[in-house]
Protein backbone atom coordinates (compact mmCIF):
# COMPACT_ATOMS: atom_id res chain seq x y z
CA UNK A 1 0.00 0.00 0.00
CA UNK A 2 2.26 2.76 1.22
CA UNK A 3 5.37 3.10 -0.92
CA UNK A 4 8.74 4.10 0.38
CA UNK A 5 9.05 7.78 1.07
CA UNK A 6 12.07 9.38 -0.55
CA UNK A 7 13.87 11.45 2.05
CA UNK A 8 15.73 14.51 0.85
CA UNK A 9 19.28 14.95 2.08
CA UNK A 10 19.87 18.12 4.06
CA UNK A 11 22.66 20.53 3.32
CA UNK A 12 24.92 21.31 6.27
CA UNK A 13 24.40 25.08 6.47
CA UNK A 14 27.63 25.72 8.37
CA UNK A 15 29.58 24.00 5.61
CA UNK A 16 27.57 25.79 2.90
CA UNK A 17 28.68 29.16 4.30
CA UNK A 18 32.35 28.17 4.35
CA UNK A 19 32.83 26.28 1.07
CA UNK A 20 31.78 27.05 -2.51
CA UNK A 21 31.93 24.74 -5.49
CA UNK A 22 33.80 26.07 -8.52
CA UNK A 23 32.92 25.50 -12.15
CA UNK A 24 35.69 22.92 -12.49
CA UNK A 25 34.29 20.86 -9.61
CA UNK A 26 36.77 21.88 -6.91
CA UNK A 27 35.71 23.41 -3.59
CA UNK A 28 37.24 26.71 -2.52
CA UNK A 29 37.62 27.90 1.06
CA UNK A 30 39.41 30.44 3.21
CA UNK A 31 42.72 29.86 4.97
CA UNK A 32 42.81 29.39 8.71
CA UNK A 33 44.95 31.35 11.23
CA UNK A 34 43.84 34.88 10.31
CA UNK A 35 41.49 35.77 13.20
CA UNK A 36 43.67 36.62 16.20
CA UNK A 37 47.29 36.50 17.43
CA UNK A 38 48.29 38.38 14.28
CA UNK A 39 51.18 40.39 15.76
CA UNK A 40 53.66 37.53 15.62
CA UNK A 41 52.79 36.65 12.00
CA UNK A 42 54.71 38.33 9.22
CA UNK A 43 53.06 40.67 6.72
CA UNK A 44 53.84 38.23 3.93
CA UNK A 45 52.18 35.36 5.79
CA UNK A 46 49.04 37.37 6.60
CA UNK A 47 48.82 38.57 3.00
CA UNK A 48 49.02 35.03 1.63
CA UNK A 49 46.42 33.80 4.14
CA UNK A 50 43.89 36.27 2.71
CA UNK A 51 43.77 34.40 -0.59
CA UNK A 52 41.32 31.58 -1.23
CA UNK A 53 42.55 28.01 -1.46
CA UNK A 54 41.12 24.66 -2.53
CA UNK A 55 39.97 21.89 -0.23
CA UNK A 56 42.55 19.12 0.09
CA UNK A 57 41.71 15.75 -1.46
CA UNK A 58 41.69 14.04 1.95
CA UNK A 59 38.76 16.27 3.06
CA UNK A 60 36.90 16.34 -0.26
CA UNK A 61 34.67 13.33 0.43
CA UNK A 62 33.40 14.80 3.70
CA UNK A 63 32.62 18.16 2.08
CA UNK A 64 30.77 16.51 -0.80
CA UNK A 65 28.65 14.48 1.63
CA UNK A 66 27.68 17.61 3.55
CA UNK A 67 26.85 19.59 0.39
CA UNK A 68 24.71 17.14 -1.62
CA UNK A 69 23.21 19.75 -3.97
CA UNK A 70 26.28 21.95 -4.55
Image: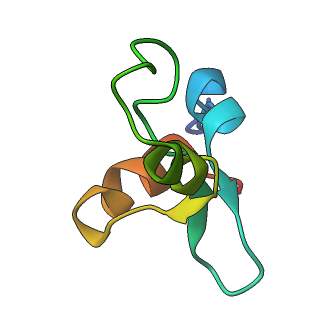
In the rendered image, the residue lying farthest to the left is 58
* Residue 29 visible (yes or no): yes
Q: Is residue 23 above or below residue 66?
A: below
24 to 33, vertically: above or below: below
Q: Position of residue 12 (x, y in %)?
A: 57, 28
**Which quarter of the figure has residue 10?**
top right
The location of residue 41, given as percent across then percent down, is 38, 33
Q: Nearer the viewer, residue 3 or 14?
A: 14
Residue 68 located left or right of residue 38: right
Q: Is residue 65 left or right of residue 25?
A: left
Q: Quadrant of the C terminus?
A: bottom right
Q: Residue at x 22, y 63 (%)?
A: 58
From what the image shows, is residue 61 above or below residue 8?
below
Q: Which residue ends up furthest to the bottom in the rendered image?
A: 24
For residue 8, say whether it is visible: no
Is 28 rendered above or below residue 45?
below
Residue at image x 52%, y 18%? 35
Q: Position of residue 15 (x, y in %)?
A: 56, 33
Picture quadrant of residue 52: bottom right
Q: Nearer the viewer, residue 25 or 56?
A: 56
Q: Nearer the viewer, residue 26 or 65?
A: 26
Q: Quadrant of residue 14?
A: top right
Q: Residue furthest right?
A: 23
Q: Nearer the viewer, residue 46 or 16?
A: 46
Q: Quadrant of the N terminus?
A: top right
Q: According to the image, what is the colour scheme of the structure?
A: rainbow
Residue 11 x %, y %: 63, 34
Question: Which residue in the rendered view is the most extreme toward the top?
Answer: 36
Q: How many marks?
A: 0
Amino acid sequence: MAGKVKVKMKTDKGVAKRFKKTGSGHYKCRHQNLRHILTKKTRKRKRSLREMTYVHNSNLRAIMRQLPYA
